[in-house]
Structure formats: structure tokens, C-alpha cells
Image: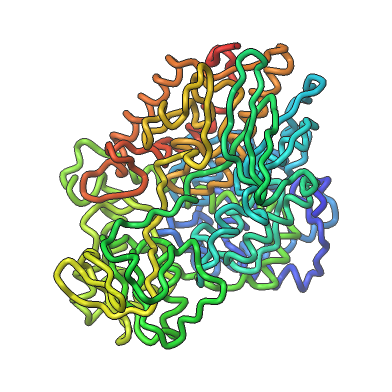
Amino acid sequence: MDSPTTPGATTDRMTEEQVRAAVAVANVPSLLMVLFQFSGDARWLQAPYLPTRGKGLVDHDSGGLPDAVQIEIREASVDVILRLQDGETPAITAPSPELTARMMSVCMGEPVGSEQGEMLAAEVARRIDPDQPELALPPVHAPAGFKLLLIGTGVAGVAAVHQLEDMGVDYEILERQPDAGGVWWMNTYPGCGVDTPSHLYSFSFARNDWSRHFELRDDIQRYFTQTLKDLGADQRIRYNTEVLSATYDEGRNKWALRVRCGDAEETLEADVVLTGVGSLNLPRLPDVPGRDTFAGIQFHSSQWPEDLDVDGKRVVIVGAGASSMQIAPAIADRVGHLTIVQRSPQWVAPFDKFMQPITAELRRLLQGCSLYFAWYWIRLFWQFGDKVIEALRVDPEWEHPERSVNARNDAHREFFTRYLTDRLAGRPDLIEKSLPEYPPFGKRILLDNGWFETIRRDDVDLVTDPVAELRPGSLVTASGADLPADVVIWATGFQAARFMSSVDVRGRNGARLSDVWDGDNPKAYLGVSVPGFPNFFMLGGPNSFPGSGSFLYFMEVQMRYVRALLTTMFDRRIAALDARQDITDAYNELVDRTHDRTVWTHPGMQTYYRNSRGRVIFVMPFLNAEYWQMTKNFNLNDYTIR
């Protein structure tokens, strides 16, 4: 879609009838911000137009406002959107950071700190027009013969390609799978989809006309493939090419990558290696006695057989996390009997827009009015991001640390508990099995896509005993219960702590990355660079995943930092660099200290966020705004020049 020339203008003209139909179903707080930014009239930021604070993760489309006030806002918005289509310029083309924070406080019905303003103002501008000159990054002048090898075409890989194409450097992409998408190509199980709103799970440079509020796997994977094609990168990708090893040559400041395609192996050379491999791609399978004796079909959830027929079968799903919660409702009405073996219960939030289509009217407005889209997006960004993170930090004075970490977190616990008991009313057995004892958000919050309805079914059993063994026709629990099974699905997650474990990476003096990280204890500076591994940079490295929010956003932020790093190298004629050890140590001490004050270190649960030592290595402990500030400007003093 072409970018608008006037801030907030529409790109696809709508008739007045279409505008009215779209505004009638639009998010009122977002419309309110459109009215203020277009008019500059401060009355729109005052009573009686002040939205209330939404509960949970719902969109709160009405803003909690009286019907008469909503009608007034919608009617005024029709006129504004039509005027934007006619080319009128908003009174406020680019809100200042201070004004943006104030607008967000009104829009969300809760205080949004001034420290958020700079980041939020930049992201609003980026959603209005990602190509506006104010957002342009400095030009890049790579030395002659420079070559970069990028590993992976998942989220991180696509974010990297966007910048690499703009930089004009010579690069090649290595992808071990036959198509793009990373985990979205690998996971094909029934019900697979995002638990982040579709428009938030999108790149700023690739706005998409999503058909569902929470899109399913096939459309997500197509989005990645199409985005790479639109960026012009499809001819640079070598599919079905697995990277076996990467070895640094200190004398030449070059990396040699041993790759395999089919039965053929070869060595490729690069000045810089940029990896977007991620860590949710190595299945974790429990060491259960008798697995090799099972006569039925068994597989990890990420390796769903293409021709699997579960109709009428006795199916056992081991695990009750995100993938199980998507699979179970999707197959429950097809199988003969379903048993779910749960290690520990999950906190589950209402999911009012599960499988709900985005109406044609709203899609037209989101595609046609960039000012509305920007405020719709930024609401989602706050709601699923820093708003949640603030509730995850430990209040040392809180009097109930065993059940929650602060007063807001406890309010979440009460809200989710009421939702659970309402959905499982009349089933005290299921309530007892399903109600967690650890604080909300200690594990990734899950969204109710029919889970509670599924486990209430007469042909579904929820078992809380651990698996003891597999027999030819059944699974046996620790209490001795024998669960007949034709199909066993291991929804047991991934070896998330073993970053880069699929590639043998060797840096200076032959140091092996897996040894430096002692297996499952990875550390990096900003999640990007590791001391002793010059010109080896990561997207989605240790502590790079948001505790809540959009991973795509974080990868864009990281890649802009990597671009600044590479630009500095080129401008200063630096052959190689890597993060200083003291800087990396200090950064990871900050990560650990901050994590000590978050819910993810709570002793009341187990989570893949932590390694075998109990250290949180997967998610970052910082607010979006804090990490954004850390990566805003590249500092050469943080690095060793080789």
C-alpha cells in the first residue's frame, strides 16, 4: 500500500456511506485521538469524553463512555475522516513526546508516564507513514566486497531484510526449511495461530489487510513469504540449506559457514554473520520409559503429520500450555476421546475476539485512514506491552507475595479467577485442577479459545498426574492410571534455553559458543553481541523476547540497532568488533537484578523462561520504552575493535 502524503490522510478513498459504516464499529478511544490530533481542540481530552480504563486484554471499544457521548464522537469522526480524504492536514501533524504521553493517558483511561512519550511518539509517526523523512536512517556506505550472511527467514530474518535492503549491502539468506516463516512454517497443528492481535503481530513496513483479529497459521506464514517477496529478497534466499557450523578466522576477520543442502556440503564466507535462528525450534521430548514400545502414532506438536486422521481416535495430549490449548478445542469434536495430561495449570484470559473476523467496514477504515490505524495500533501496543509489564514487577511491601507480586497483579488474579470459576461453574473438580497457585503472568498468559468449554465435555478428561510410562496401547500415569491411546501428542514445548544450539559457532581462539554459555546459560550484550565472537550478531538472542507485547516490534528495534552498529563499522573503517566483556557483564547483571524484581523469578512455578539454574534467559525484564532507549543510539565504546 502506498504511503499517504498528508499525515493521517487516507490512501483508498471511502464514500461517506462507507465512512459512516466503518465509524459505527470503530474503537471509540482511537477515534477520539483522531479528533484531537486533527482539530487540536483540547476539549476532546477532557470530560465528558474521557474513556475509562479497560479490564484485562479486551479492546474496550466503547471506551466505557455513555451512548450519547459515543454517538457524538462517531459523528464528529465521520466529518474528520472525509476531510482527511480531501487532503486537509491535521492541526497536529506530529504530537510531541509530552503530548503523546498525555494523549495515551486519555486514550487508555490510565496514567501513561512521560518516559514513554518519546518512543510512543515515534511509533505513532511510524504507523502513520513508515517512509516519512523524519524516520529515515542515515545512508550506509559498505566497503567494496563486503558480504553478510543472514540465517533464518522467521520474524527476525524478515526484520533484518527490511534494513539490509534499505542499506544496499550484499547479503544472502540461509534457510534450512523449504519456505519462509520460521516457527510459522514448522507448526501446522490444528488451531495454530497468534495470541497477539494480528495488527500488532505485523511489521511497521508491511501493513497487512488482516481478515481476523487473531490470525491463524496459514495466513501468518503467507504474510512472511509475501513480505520477503515485496522487499525484493526472494532471490537472495537459499532454502533447504542448513547451517552446520560457523568459524571465525581472526587473521582475515572472516567467518566460514559450513552448510548442507541435501547430500551436498559447502563452505560459504562472510564478513558478518547475522542470525535470526531463535530458540523455539528444538522440540523438548520427555524421557519416558516405553516410548519406543508404543504401537500407535506419537509426535511432538511442532511435527504434526500431514496426513494424520484423528477422527474417532483415542487421543492423549501431554501438556497444557499454548500449543495444547490451541490443539484441544480444534480436534475435540472429531476424536473419539480426548485426554489432556496437565503438569501445571495456566492462567487464562477472556478471548472475546477469538476466531472473530474483522468486519469489511473496519478493514476498510484500518487500510484507508492511517491516522486511525496509528492510534488503533498504539492502543494494542500499550495494552499488550508496558501496561502488562508494570503489573509484573515485585512490590517488596506487598503483603501477599505467595499469590501475586503487587496490588495490580492481585487484581489480575481476582479477575482471571472469576472468569475461570464462571466458565467452569458446576464443575468443582475442574476448578480445582485448573486454578493456578502462582501469580498471573508468571508463565505466558493464555487466551481462552474454547479451552474451558472443551475440558467440560463428557468425552474429554483432564488428568493432573505426571506421565510414568508408555505401553503399546496406552499411557500410564504416576498414580497407575492406564489411559488408552491411539495417538499421543507431545505438547511439551521446546529447549528454549539452548540458543543457537543447532549451529556449532566458534569465535576467537576457537572458543565454542555453547561452552562459553555453559549449555543453557546464554548471555549477550543487549541480546545482540557476545564477547570473543567478532562480527557475529544476533536478533532474538538471550533475553530478547518481550515478556508481553509484540516480538515483531522488538526485532525491528534490535535490527535498527544492528544497522547503526554496521554503519559505524563502515564509516570508521572497522574490520571487526564485538561487545566488551565488562560491558556485557554489567548489562547481564542489570538483567538479572531487574528479573529478581519480576514475576518470572517467582518460586511458585516452572517456566521455560528459566534455565536449569533458575536464571531467566528467555524474556527481557525491561519495559518496551526502557529497551528502546538502550538501543536508540549505538555506542562504539561498548565494543572491542579488532
Task: Using residue 541 as the reference point, say whether residue 577 is left or right of it.
Answer: right
Depth order, front residue of 111/4? 4
Quarter assignment of residue 435: bottom left
Depth order, front residue of 312/582? 312
Quadrant where the image shows the C terminus:
top right
Q: Where is residue 584 in the image (x, y as percent from the top left)?
A: 44, 21
Q: Where is residue 565 in the image (x, y as percent from the top left)?
A: 64, 23
Residue 98 is at least partly visible in this image: no
Q: Residue at x 63, y 33 (%)?
A: 257
Q: Position of residue 44 (x, y in %)?
A: 59, 51
Task: Using residue 368 as the reference point, say whether residue 347 is left or right of it.
Answer: left
Residue 328 is at least partly visible in this image: yes
Quarter assignment of residue 188: bottom right
Quadrant where the image shows the N terminus:
bottom right
Residue pushed farthest front? Answer: 263
Task: Using residue 501 as the reference point, say whether residue 23 is left or right of it.
Answer: right
Q: Where is residue 383 in the image (x, y as percent from the top left)?
A: 48, 52
Depth order, front residue of 38/297? 297
Q: Which residue is drawn at 51% across and 16% down?
A: 509
Position of residue 413 relative to residue 484, above or below, is: above
Q: Residue at x 58, y 49 (%)?
A: 378
Position of residue 33 relative to residue 138, above or below, is: below
Q: Which residue is drawn at 66% across and 64% down?
A: 210
Q: Which colour scheme is used?
A: rainbow
Depth order, front residue of 132/355? 355
| Total numbered circles | 0
